[in-house]
Amino acid sequence: MTASTRRTALSLYMRVFRIARTWQAQSGVTSDTETERKYIIQEAQTLFRQNQQLTDRECIMNCLEECKARIEIGLHYRNPYPRAAYLPPMGLATQKGRRLRAQQRLRKQAKPIYLQSHDDT
């Protein structure tokens, strides 16, 4: 990891913690605010530690883009949880003769950047 990439990752990490410190739940309920703050901190720690050992520059840049997207979406919608994206099974168009593998590839390509770290969506 280069120095500039490391600096970017650390600044994003600190930005997430600053957001968590000042986070207010949209409902205004204190317990909701605390729950959402804990979620933000736990999710940041989990994902940053999970990706700590990455060495491929492209993978690192994808993770940083995902982090930026999740921050912006969370701030915009005032919801820290990832937004669901639903793709019905076998719902993407394919060429003749290419069924399952083509569907899996298209579903992977259609997954939004802010959900790349989640396997079960």
Image: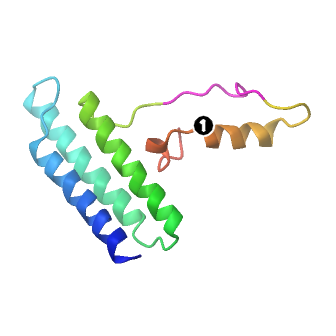
At horizontal 14% and vertical 39% (from top left) the residue drawn is: 23
Q: For this view, does 77 lie left or right of residue 85?
A: left
* Up/down of 71 relative to 91, above or below: below
Q: Position of residue 76 (x, y in %)?
A: 27, 31
Q: Using the image as rendered, state which of residue 13 and residue 30 is in the foreground.
A: 13
Q: Which residue is mark 1?
A: 110
Judging from the image, the colouring scheme is rainbow
Tag 1 secondary structure:
helix
In the visual, does 89 lie left or right of 60?
right
State the image coordinates of residue 57 (x, y, percent, origin top left).
Answer: 50, 68
Instruction: Identify residue type, mark 1.
Output: Ala
Q: Name above or below for residue 46 compared with residue 37.
A: below
- The residue range painted magenta reads 85-93
State the predominant SS element of the stretch in magenta: loop
Does any portion of residue 80 appear in the rendered image?
no
Quadrant of the frame with the N terminus: bottom left
26 within the magenta span:
no
Residue drawn at x 53%, y 47% as measured from the top left:
119
Residue 109 % position (x, y)? 63, 42
Q: Nearer the viewer, residue 121 or 114?
A: 114
